[in-house]
Image: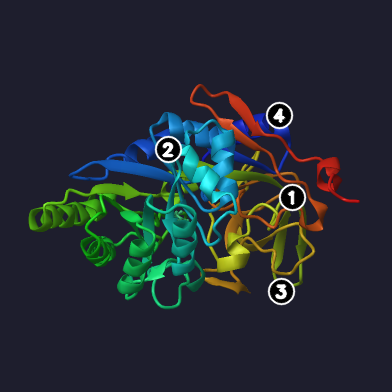
Amino acid sequence: MRDPMINYQTATRIAASTGTPVFVYDEAQLKAQAEAALTIPAPFGLTVRYAMKAAPTRAILRLFSDKGLHFDASSGYEAERLLAAGIDASKISLSTQELPVNFVELVQQGMSVNACSLNQLETYGKALPGTQVGLRFNPGLGSGGTNRTNVGGPASSFGIWNAKVEEVRAILEKFSLCAFRIHTHIGSGSDPEVWKRAASLSLRMAEAYETVTHFNLGGGFKVARVEGENSTDLQACGAPVAQLLEDFAERTGRKLHFEIEPGTFLIANAGALLTRVQDIVDTGEEGYSFLKIDAGMTEILRPSLYGAQHPIELLQAKPGTVRRPVIVVGHCCESGDILTPAPGDPEALSARDLPDARIGDFALIGGAGAYCSAMSAKNYNSFPEAPEILLCTDGSIKVIRKRQTLEQILVNEA
Ligand SMILES: *Cc1c(COP(=O)(O)O)cnc(C)c1O
């Protein structure tokens, strides 16, 4: 569909600087996506938070911070990583499955917390009575791309179940807590109807707690990585939500500040993994042809985990002309380490038509900015963590994370 993020010449330049495999992030695209996210309609104010679990490297955090984004942290460690990057605590919101032991300290520095379970709310109230807290609800509606990315509805453990309004109220009263934010994150996808339903269900929660001033719908704005997938039209998804916020204000007199927390939308297509073909094998006429690259689940786990589809392009000095079906596999001793599974089915192989490859050719895996470097089977087979570079708007290459060394893998061993 779209052209590969970099061409052969740029790939050669990057490989000369860091070797392969290497994650490449495009500064211009990162900035453009941040600017696009800031245009979602919001009648009474907007905060866009980068869901940093998508890609948490310092240079990326700084770039988004400079664009005016705030942050969503999914663990205490992520929150501390933001602080270490020089991000002010007041820009951090924590929504986590596991409340960190030092959450009091983090809140005292200015970070906000969304209680994601009754137990978290109770723990928070005990430690910080009389303060403000956000409430993450599961509004009872789900919409993930796959079962494993579904983060709402009865099969999801994220957030307080929507029917537990009275239990929540009792805990708020017990500790004189003020609920200031309603948070939901169901991964609504690219369908404006689903965003509208998620917003209207979440607004019921905002209506139930009069002290709420902030309305956060989370992330989940899908982008198309390969042909046949849909990208989110932010204006189309935002318009009905903005209307609901206006209606809410008219009915209740309360003008809610709107927040979104995109991860994927901001960075998925602004990143790619540059690899090299390091072997080519086949299993005979009835079998398959396999391209083995010098990366795999140690860099990109999504295909093995969800059957996620990533575009793969060969970058060759002399482009091959005949395209043949091949299976692209990773370098790990693990039969599940494949880059071309069937869509949504990590167990099944699905061949891609690629030009004739030679050992040493570059293979560029696209759509690899989000949940790739951040969510890999790091150090499996003792492969070191791949470096990351930023392809700057002036064409220069900035190494934002070096390749890990073997010594660094071993450093904590007795
Ligand atoms: C993961 C996550 C996001 C970002 O999801 P994307 O699908 O990457 O946009 C936003 N908010 C919360 C609470 C999350 O856990």
* Residue 272 position within the rendered picture, expressed as x and y whole percent measured from the top left: 57, 44
Residue contact between numbered discs 3 and 2, judged by CB atoms under 8 Å: no
Q: Which residue is mark 1?
A: 294
Q: Nearer the viewer, residue 78 or 1?
A: 78
Residue at far right of view? 414
Q: Residue at the location (44% across, 68% down)?
A: 118
Left or right of residue 196, residue 286 in this image: right
| Amino acid type, label 3 | Gly
Q: CA distance from mark 2 to mark 1?
A: 41 Å
Q: Which residue is mark 2?
A: 90
Q: Mark 1: which secondary structure?
A: loop
Q: Looking at the image, is mark 3 or mark 4 earlier in the sequence?
A: 4
Question: Which quadrant of the view contains residue 10?
Answer: top right
Q: Residue at the location (71% across, 29% down)?
A: 17
**Disc 4 residue: CB within 8 Å of ligand 1:** no
Q: Mark 3: which secondary structure?
A: loop
| Amino acid type, label 2 | Ser
Against 233, residue 58 (above or below) is above
Q: CA distance from mark 3 to mark 1?
A: 22 Å
Q: CA distance from mark 3 to mark 2?
A: 57 Å
| Amino acid type, label 1 | Asp
Q: Looking at the image, is mark 2 or mark 4 earlier in the sequence?
A: 4
Q: CA distance from mark 3 to mark 4?
A: 38 Å
Left or right of residue 329, residue 249 in this image: left
Q: Looking at the image, is mark 3 or mark 1 earlier in the sequence?
A: 3
Numbered tag placed on residue 287 in the rendering: 3
Q: Looking at the image, is mark 2 or mark 1 earlier in the sequence?
A: 2
Residue at far left of view? 250
Q: CA distance from mark 1 to mark 4?
A: 17 Å
| Amino acid type, label 4 | Ser
Numbered tag placed on residue 17 in the rendering: 4
Residue contact between numbered discs 3 and 4, judged by CB atoms under 8 Å: no
